Amino acid sequence: MGTSLFPDSSNPKPLLVDGARLNKILLELAKYGRNDHGGIDRVSFSEADRNARQYVIELMKNAGLDVTIDAAANIIGRRKGNNADAKPIMLGSHIDSVPSGGNYDGQVGSAAAVEVAQILHENNQITRHPLEFVIFSNEEGGKTGSRAMAGEIETSELDIMTASGFTIGEGLRANSGDPDKLTKVKRLKGSIAGFLELHIEQGGILEKEGLTIGVVEGIVGIKRWSVTVKGFTNHAGTTPMTERRDSLVAAAQFIQAVHRIAKNMSGRQVATVGKITPEPGAPNVIPGRTSLTLEIRDLDMVIIDNLFKVLVKESKLIGEETGTQFAFDQFYLSKAALTDDLFRKVIEEETEKLGFSYTRMPSGAGHDAQSIAQLAPVGMIFIPSLGGISHSPKEKSRSKDIEAGANVLLQSLLTLDHQLS
Amino acid sequence: MGTSLFPDSSNPKPLLVDGARLNKILLELAKYGRNDHGGIDRVSFSEADRNARQYVIELMKNAGLDVTIDAAANIIGRRKGNNADAKPIMLGSHIDSVPSGGNYDGQVGSAAAVEVAQILHENNQITRHPLEFVIFSNEEGGKTGSRAMAGEIETSELDIMTASGFTIGEGLRANSGDPDKLTKVKRLKGSIAGFLELHIEQGGILEKEGLTIGVVEGIVGIKRWSVTVKGFTNHAGTTPMTERRDSLVAAAQFIQAVHRIAKNMSGRQVATVGKITPEPGAPNVIPGRTSLTLEIRDLDMVIIDNLFKVLVKESKLIGEETGTQFAFDQFYLSKAALTDDLFRKVIEEETEKLGFSYTRMPSGAGHDAQSIAQLAPVGMIFIPSLGGISHSPKEKSRSKDIEAGANVLLQSLLTLDHQLS
């Protein structure tokens, strides 16, 4: 690659990113916080994070962007448009990682945004809308940057200790932000024309179906419950099998039901039990009480609630059968955020024009786009994660898929620049 | 009660215990270590334990016994027989409790043994065999006293910390024993004519069937395994239900199978999963690895092994179905100890003569009789536990059942005294 062609109205040849340069940026980024397993330890506010941010700031400056850091430590590279009245189109992602993370989560979308800026710069192509290229702050540790833009940060969060050894407040300061001025970061609803984010899928659907692009329909909503099963504690030697009210046996039946029912329903809902604690928890005692977590995710909050109702009903039957009682206590809620219909259509059309295969799909994981969706129409583009692995040094996406995703990002931006008011 | 009649060959009226006195001893014993829940905290080597031991020693002395404390801190009250060549018949139990224990476990058999000694003393009835009335040391914390008699104590056990705050070694010393001389406690096989223990059932079978006496067939053997289920850790949001290799779902299916198979087999085997730990153990992560404990008990070690084989086979099917792998590692073995056939018959006949109902049954819990069975023929007598509850302040046995059990103990002793060489 490296060549780039101006669009031509009669026989349009699209502007394309430099795939080799883009993948080289990712290789360079992988050096900041590299660990022994081939992945990175680059949690937000760490030294590796600060160094990687400096590297990206230099790339942005080279791409002619006007770089500032806001109070939430978001790195924002601005580029003027030729329509003085137009609101900015924003694109970007994050470069911080989970502990022992991989080289693609967040980084693909961030590097692609920088490459889009570079290509526009090299080709002197001025969009109608001003553009903002954003590296959001502390995505993995609570989406601090994007949530600050949406005005969703609680002051108490600033005291949360992070894996960097800093609290979020201290970390913001260390990364040139200002925790006392977070309200200034807040954007008004309607003040952004739109937001585009390219990201790795973090699941295995695209790879399994042999597709290049996922057109994200939205970021799923999440509800979590603490479930308590009450039975009767008894001696595991003296209590016959027929006389037991074993809370763990009842819980096991429930876990089976959660998996079976969520799997057999039509739709793409997922339901998970990730944690379970029987009490007293000794090999020779029938557990009288077992607590576990239940998580349900779907794009549609109604589907989450309906599945939950079915599971509660099922738990009553299990309770009657096993002499136990189930209680449910919701402790977490994250509302679903849908992508914009125009954005989906534009992404699909550009993907088709570029000759890539695609499917529509939900995002099971949370993203910065989730908060920005409170302010503006958003679009998200997924590329395949090999083996569906993420948050691991084994996380991997193919170079050609990264290039494809960046080209879909660039073309969608250019088309939306024409279509958005 | 309070009256006692000498046996008469033509129309035998049996010697009977003083039920009121026996139940009063239990009420007195309940004062040592009494807790707020109506039960006792009288773990071995605690001050409450020492005080209760002193109380029992006084009762033994009043009953004319020659009381000594051996190196394992067993309290032994001796009574001479009229046959110089006969080996001693032993009877007894323990008076230490689990933390937050009840007023019957061990105490019923201990108080009944003391009452038997008292009745024999009051009636000047001399048995052919010498008698040893034993309060075994630290039953709940590892059967230290009875296992020392059987020569089963490992030196390393003396360093085990107990709930009293003393190690077992320190505790033995505090209770007038001597941990350096434990080998002197060991009895030779064949040196005891027989052993009888009265105990509460600690299960709910006798009460449920409306019976007074359980003729114990033996103390069940126990095997315990650590079971590991390996699946694949993944994101609970991005991994579709059909693509999961969830180790906890597989473990849940196994727990169900353990319960179902042990319940549906003929026989009285019990199988329990009391502990389970999924990893990483977060609400939003599919557990890649789950470890759990499996315990199987039966009177017949072959039945334990056969049930285990069935469960391993079942785990392979579950593994294939769920994309997981099961591994089993045995970490505990306690061999079954059968009671003596003559002892069972004598207990049954005496129970019938006294007009009580009975059934033969295994003991699902461990007892001092288990170790003494290595040295001599043993017999065990159970009385009902209300609600099958034990190791709890709610543990309860009816006064009339306690008296019935003590009378069966006394009559079985007298008959065995005639029948044993």
Image: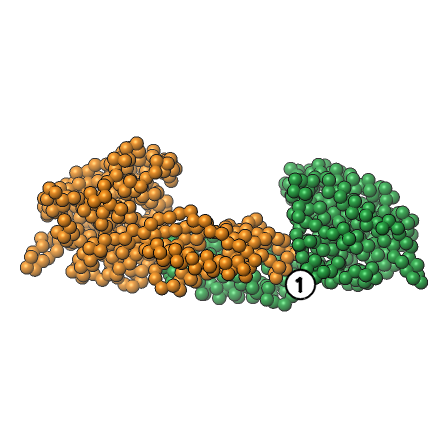
Chain colours: A green, B orange
Q: Quadrant of residue A24?
A: top right
Residue sticking out furthest to the top: B180
**For the point 45% across and 65% down, which residue is it?**
A320
Which chain is mark 1 on?
A
Q: Secondary structure at mark 1?
A: loop
Relative to residue A416, is residue A67 depicted above or below?
A: above
The image shows residue B400 at horizontal and vertical percentages of: 22, 56
**For the point 28% across and 58% down, which residue is it?**
B361
**For the point 47% across and 60% down, which residue is it?**
B314
Residue A236 seen from this side: yes
Question: For this view, does A241 lie left or right of residue A210?
Answer: left
Q: Kindly identify the amino acid type of the residue bearing the numbered disc 1.
A: Asp
Front in this rendered view, residue A184 or A382: A382
Residue occupied by mark 1: A300
Image quadrant holding the N terminus of chain B, namely: bottom left
Question: For this view, does A273 lie left or right of residue B306?
Answer: right
The image shows residue A370 at horizontal and vertical percentages of: 72, 54
